[in-house]
Amino acid sequence: MIVDESSSRAQGRVLATAVGLAFLLFVLVLQLVRLQVLERHTLLEAARQGNSASAAVVRRARGNIVDQAGRLLATDIFLWEVDVSPGLISDEEALAQTLSPLIGLTSEEILERIRSAPSDAPYVVLAKGIEEPQGEKIADRKRAAEDSKREEERRLWLPVSVTPYPRRYYPQGSLAVHALGFVNIDGLAFFGVEGFYQEFLTGASVMRSGKVDDVSLPADFSLYIPSAVGRDLVLTLDVGVQHLVEKELRRAVEYYGAQAGTIIVMNPKTGEVLAMANEPAFDPNRYSESEDQQQINRAISWPYEPGSVVKVITLAAGLDSGKISPDQTFQDEGVLRVGDREIHNSDYRAHGTVTLTDILALSLNVGAAKISMEMGAETFYNYIKRFGFGRVTEIDLAGEVSGLIKTPDSSMWSPSDLVTNAYGQGMTVTPIQLITAVSAIANDGVAMHPRVVRMVVDHGRVIPTHPRPYQRAISVETARYMRQLMAEATARGIDANLVPGYKVAGKTGTAQIPTSTGYSDDEVITTYVAFLPADDPQVIILVTLDRPTRSMWASQVAVPVFQNIANRLVRMLHIPPDYTP
């Protein structure tokens, strides 16, 4: 926590953070407006004017999306649209009465739509979204009329067009909705892999690049892959893990009285995302009933102050740069003055001579601040950049944003930012950035680009996506020492038997929320990031809950959620234990 002796500087600091957050929110709002209003209007208007190319984009069929075991997550079903050509209508009243019981509109509503259309309109849409059985029935009536020997019947149905078109369907409902995204009734993709791979899934582009390995799909994939469309995606997501994560997240948000929450499960060695969940969520089959805030993927589009989780980055940077040593101790007086600021530990206590393990286990702000001062701004921010903060991760999901990191070359930066950033205050990151950064420690010093697609299947041609490393963040030796340090701190500060049989290496973060007058005293965001087994990490999990009301501490809110998931996950993923409890 910070006690600022200059209220004007405190307000300026919070204002700078708030401005950064407001700007990111503004960018998101602009993106939503562009997708939901501007581009939608352009495409629909082009279709109304008979632009066949644009209309084809709107109505183009999409390939299937399955999880890593071939279980169907997204596919196309067909709905029907009924149009009429006003210039060919011989008897408006008779046509309206004939179509009324078939399309679910009154005769008056049909006449109103026909008569209110522009005089030069080539056609008028009377109804769309008609389910397949009824659409087939109307099409049969149209065909029967065309074959009829009665001239009156043929003339009555002459202006009617009955056309099937694809509509996206998600058989698992809301499962993995934020990773998938959704497609609206006009064929426009929003967010997720649907948005990121829009051109490939619709055939607007082809996969001309990419190494085609000697890879064949398992036989049980044949039910859905390759699809008739021929443009399909196999995800890294595991439906079983996703079910578990979403169930635990819903329970946690309700039990702890949180406003929202996010959980990510990832393989730190490959960057493959096994599960990604947010609350609140929504059903993509009924996207029109959801709000914009529900549709945004908080895992990649929600920058927030992470709090003390960043201490593991600070310690790793200090060790790797040689500015501190593994056996170094620090004097913790409980308060540290930096300029006209006072930095306090969260418990407002002095802990005397402390080790690096103490700093993590007790989550000491003063200790982390002193380590950042030992490094200096240039070294500290160089490592912050190497761990990936301040830029997008390039995950293959539409809608990712980067957090905000002030550096010494910014006019908003002040020397006190160096020490507060050391424990995750005054900077913003997204959950995907945070779990990716910590995964560098789990993966011997190199983080992998997170990814959600495992294979692209182009008309039977299998194109795997391969792990892509970032630049090295820290040395192998530093990473392995940090894993040991984090495991010891977890055993001391949380629970040595958090997941029986497995050494867990993790860090909590309890971050106060900026307001217009300072930091809130009663609203926090809690985070826990941990991986296991600590000596050979197979999985890393991030849990964050926004504004919980039952408790304000991550150790009492986020850690139990992690524990519930991890104890099930080690069995689901067949991860062998590393000790006998």
Image (cartoon, rainbow, N blue to C red):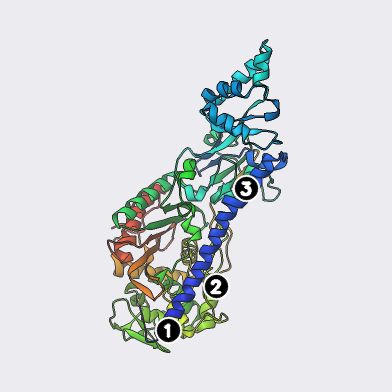
Q: Amino acid at mark 1?
A: Ser
Q: Position of residue 313 (x, y in %)?
A: 46, 72
Identify the residue position indicated by label 2 in the image: 385
Which quadrant: the C terminus? bottom left
Residue drawn at 54 percent across, 69 percent down: 390
Q: Is residue 535 visible?
A: yes
Q: Position of residue 533 (x, y in %)?
A: 39, 60
Q: Against 461, is 164 above or below?
A: above
Identify the residue position indicated by label 3 in the image: 41
Query: Marks 3 and 1: CB-CB under 8 Å?
Result: no
Kindly report the distance in space between the C-alpha atoms of the residues bearing marks 2 and 3: 40 Å
Instruction: Please indicate whether residue 69 sits to the left or right of residue 144 in the image.
Output: left
Q: Secondary structure at mark 3?
A: helix
Identify the residue position indicated by label 1 in the image: 8
Other-residue count near label 2 (Cα within 10 Å), few / some / many at <14 / 14–19 / ≥20: some
Q: Nearer the viewer, residue 211 or 385?
A: 385
Q: Earlier in the sequence, mark 3 or mark 1?
A: 1
Q: Position of residue 70 (x, y in %)?
A: 51, 39
Closer to the eye: label 3 or 1: 3
